[in-house]
Amino acid sequence: MNTRFFSDTRVMTGRSLRHITRSMDTIITVAITPIAMMLMFVYVLGGAIQAGTDNYVSYVLPGILLIAIASGISYTAYRLFIDLQSGIFERFHSMPIARSSVLWGHVLTSLVSNAISVVVIVLVALLMGFRSSAGVVPWLAVAAILGLFTLALTWIAVLAGLSATSTDGAGAFSYPLIFLPFISSAFVPTATMPGPVRVFAENQPVTAIVNTIRALFERQPVGGEIWIALAWCVGILLIAYALAMRAYRHKIG
Amino acid sequence: MEEKNLAIQVHGLQKSFGKLQVLKGVDFDVARGSIFALLGSNGAGKTTIVRILTTLLKPDDGTASVDGFDVLSQPARVRESISLTGQFAAVDEILTGRENLIMIAELRHVKTAGKMADDLLERFGLADASGRRVSAYSGGMRRRLDIAMSLIGNPRIIFLDEPTNGLDPQGRIEVWQVIQNLADGGTTVFLTTQYLDEAEKLADRIAILHEGTIVVSGTLEELRKLLPPAKVEYVERQPTLEEIFLAIVGSDKKDQR
């Protein structure tokens, strides 16, 4: 079973990766909107925002990356939905393969395509003046947190793709996820927000993740926030995975 | 017939979707190496039977075994023995024809996936289009690729759900040829169709599914005997439109474009 799972997942991932390399536009669009936002925040709004930092690009970058990932994963839901609509899913399911490899192929592809988007955005941020004195270990920690965040959100996308009834519906779930960074510490300090908004902002996953990444970039102590960030990612991942697998089993009878 | 000579056995199969009872107790057997055609109008439940036999759907009641394995208790064994060509071409549009074949070959753990793909492309008249994306294929080419993908791993039983649906006359004849070759090679073919001439041309045995049960089944000869014997009449035979069409456009195997 296990050897079959790994070899089948490799084939499925290869298939799915070909899909994204043959439609590079999907990766470009995923990267372009967050880049436009970053330009707007830095060059339009940035001058008026009192974030208590002299490098606002570095300040907004973590939040921009999370927005990119939140919009990037909607393609996973879309591709999965298209697969379900076409006959290829039934062919796979009538074959002697590890059935969960059908989903894992899409999930691993999401990790790769989002990683590409993230790298592109970081390069643009460098051009805009983003600087970090962080060494290899903090960078690896940032990559790991972003990877975990992508994985957790991708399983939400899998759930959405399996439950959607239309292509529009398959993508719509990501809008709230894209919006979440705006009500967090991603663009402005939470201290200026009114009571209830501030409580929400300070206790939702994005703030913990943004603060952790920011601290890692600035070589500041991450404190307990990294554990809160990891707990959110792992918690969302486990719940989304369980729900997605349940929806999958229901789907394939 | 002895059980070991049966590729498929179905007894008392029932399936409902909500209040709609699609299958009301379906019984039939399919002999190994034969072509079995399940005939029925749209919505008769043909696809439901195919989906149950290929482990994609669980029956409410009754038993079904494929290649000697029960579809409910041994679905993994059933999947080792079968291949499904569904109603809608189950091909990957973004990949090329060759990549589609290699993908399936790798999933079936065929050692020489590349060579097998090239052989199949040649055999199905797709060699020239092997490097093109399937989205650029014609309906007939897509169907041929679809069936070629189903042959990988030498499944003992092949399910074809309305394989000629939506094909032009040439495409139909090509697919018929493929099906006949499969059966000649010893593969059991389970075919659904709503075209009477298709069943007549290909099938060793025909079963007619109507309102949830098999109303008649047998060889074409046996079915003919159900009606009064044929009278001999003199009829001036006009060419059929199909014959005219094929005479004009030619019935070459390859799609020329």
Image (spheres, rainbow, N blue to C red):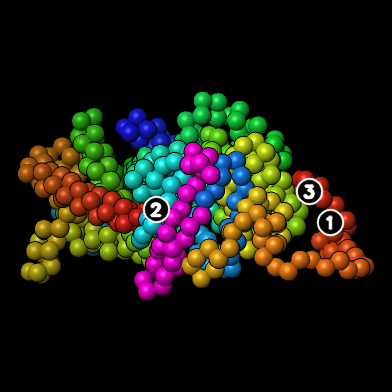
**Spatial distance from mark 1 to mark 2, Cα to Cα?**
44 Å
Q: Is A150 or A62 nearer to us in this picture? A: A150
Does label 2 or label 3 sit earlier along the sequence?
2
Q: Which marked residue is nearer to the observer: mark 3 or mark 1?
A: 1
Q: Which residue is mark 1?
A: B246
Q: Is B250 or A11 nearer to us in this picture? A: B250
- Residue A51 placement (x, y as % from top left): 17, 56
Tell me what residue is drawn at x 36 percent, y 59 percent. Answer: B61
Can residue B25 be seen here? yes
Can residue A40 be seen here? no
Q: Is residue A91 above or below residue B60?
A: above
- Numbered disc 3: secondary structure: loop
Neighbour tally class for label 1: few under 14, some 14-19, many 20 plus, Cα within 10 Å: some
Tell me what residue is drawn at x 51 percent, y 55 percent. Answer: B28
Query: Is residue B10 in the magenta section?
Result: yes
Kind of residue at disc 2: Thr
- Mark 1 vs mark 2: tell me if same chain: yes
Does label 3 or label 1 sit earlier along the sequence?
1
Which chain is mark 1 on?
B
Q: Quadrant of residue A119?
A: top left
- Residue A142 placement (x, y as % from top left): 23, 39
Q: Which residue is mark 2?
A: B63
- Numbered disc 2: secondary structure: strand
Q: Which marked residue is nearer to the observer: mark 1 or mark 2?
A: 2
Tell me what residue is drawn at x 39 percent, y 68 percent. Answer: B17
Does label 1 or label 2 sit earlier along the sequence?
2
- Does the CB distance between marks 1 and 2 fall below 8 Å? no
Q: Which residue is mark 3?
A: B256
- Numbered disc 1: secondary structure: helix
Q: Is residue A212 above or below residue B108?
A: below
